[in-house]
């Protein structure tokens, strides 16, 4: 049994020690926030993207940093997962990306708005969240690349959503195994620039890829024989 004075000392010193630890840890957390959030990288575009995110209630369907609704995909790492062209496609017209299958509504974003949201997602992807969200097993790690032509990063981010290769990927478009036997480089280039210009009723959207990415993709696709 503690005596009364021992109990008092125990109470006061215990409370003080816990209070000091609590204040210390709180200060330490606050000290880390600027580095973890990469506060220096918050440009006006990123801030504008956040405004658009809030204003349009994207969180009504999506989660970000784990907060929000679970109807639609977590978007913290969407920039890394899908790349800019895909995000722009979703912000332009989700139906064009996935005809008749998807539930995201079409917004009327201006080009600067889309750029701001892309900048916002690029930033959210760089925030240090102590490993959240866990990395999904991305299809690009599973799709083998033929003939020593390296698989362009954009292929694993974007094309694989709709196409499969070696049995991995989506089934919105045809499997791309052996596409080099069916199509030559010139056709592939025209196709990737603007699918509806080649085939007006096609379900593959115009993705607005830069020429450098198209070159890489054509080399890769041509090698799939
Ligand atoms: C009504 C619900 C809803 C709202 C509101 C909504 N989305 Fe979506 N969004 C979806 C669904 C569902 C998908 C998944 C589409 C799919 O799997 O094909 C999606 C997909 C996306 C993707 C692609 C994610 C991925 O990993 O493929 C992005 C980027 C995106 N949404 C951004 C936004 C932004 C930005 C807003 C707000 C301006 C927004 N969404 C508002 C339902 C919604
Ligand atoms: C939103 C879905 C979607 C995305 C994303 C997409 N495609 Fe397609 N793709 C299709 C569909 C659907 C077709 C079939 C077009 C048709 O015949 O109307 C197609 C056709 C093709 C073809 C022609 C295949 C053939 O046998 O003639 C190639 C090549 C191709 N896509 C490459 C790509 C590449 C490379 C990417 C990534 C940059 C990509 N696609 C992204 C849906 C998509």
Image: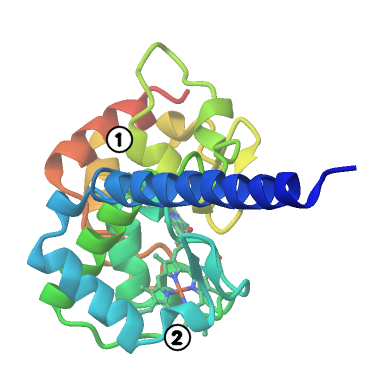
Q: In this view, does 170 lie above or below 75?
A: above
27 and 34: which one is in front?
27
The first of marks 1 and 2 along the sequence is 2
Name the image quarter holding residue 119. Answer: bottom left
Which residue is most to the right? 1
Q: Quick check: 35 left or right of 58?
A: left
Residue visible at 49% across and 44% down? 21
Name the image quarter holding residue 55. Answer: bottom left
Residue visible at 27% across and 73% down? 50
Which mark lies nearer to you, 1 or 2? 2
Residue 105 is tagged as 2
193 and 125: which one is in front?
125
Q: Quick check: 5 left or right of 162?
A: right
Residue visible at 23% across and 50% down? 34
Check whether the beta carbons of the residues at disc 1 and disc 2 lie within 8 A of each other: no
Residue visible at 35% across and 58% down? 86
Between the residue at mark 1 and the residue at mark 2, the CA separation in whole angstroms equals 30 Å
Q: Is mark 2 on a helix, strand or loop?
A: loop
In the rendered image, is residue 218 in sight? yes
Q: Name the residue under label 1.
A: 217
Q: In this view, does 107 lie above or below 199?
A: below
Residue 173 is tagged as none
Q: Are there few (<14), some (14-19), or many (20+) residues within 10 Å of tag 1?
A: many
Q: Does the residue labelled 1 lie within 8 Å of ligand 2?
A: yes
Q: Does the residue labelled 2 lie within 8 Å of ligand 1?
A: yes
55 and 156: which one is in front?
55
Image position, residue 97 (x, y; %): 43, 68
Q: In this view, does 108 lie above or below 202?
A: below
């Amino acid at each position: 049994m503690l005596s009364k004075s021992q109990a008092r000392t125990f109470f006061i010193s215990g409370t003080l020690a816990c209070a000091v630890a609590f204040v210390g840890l709180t200060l330490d957390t606050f000290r880390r926030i600027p580095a973890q959030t990469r506060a220096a990288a918050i440009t006006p575009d990123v801030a504008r993207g956040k405004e658009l995110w809030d204003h349009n209630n994207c969180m009504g369907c999506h989660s970000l940093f784990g907060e929000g609704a679970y109807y639609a995909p977590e978007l913290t790492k969407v920039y890394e997962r899908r790349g800019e062209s895909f995000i722009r496609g979703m912000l332009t017209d989700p139906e064009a990306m996935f005809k008749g299958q998807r539930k995201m509504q079409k917004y009327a974003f201006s080009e600067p708005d889309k750029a701001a949201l892309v900048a916002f997602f690029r930033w959210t992807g760089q925030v240090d969240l102590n490993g959240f969200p866990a990395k999904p097993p991305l299809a690009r790690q599973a799709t083998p690349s033929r003939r020593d032509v390296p698989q362009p990063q954009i292929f694993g981010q974007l094309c694989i959503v709709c196409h499969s290769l070696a049995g991995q990927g989506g089934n919105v478009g045809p499997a791309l195994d052996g596409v080099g036997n069916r199509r030559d480089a010139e056709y592939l280039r025209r196709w990737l620039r603007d699918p509806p210009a080649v085939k007006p009723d096609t379900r593959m959207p115009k993705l607005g890829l830069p020429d450098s990415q198209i070159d890489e993709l054509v080399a890769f696709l041509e090698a799939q024989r």
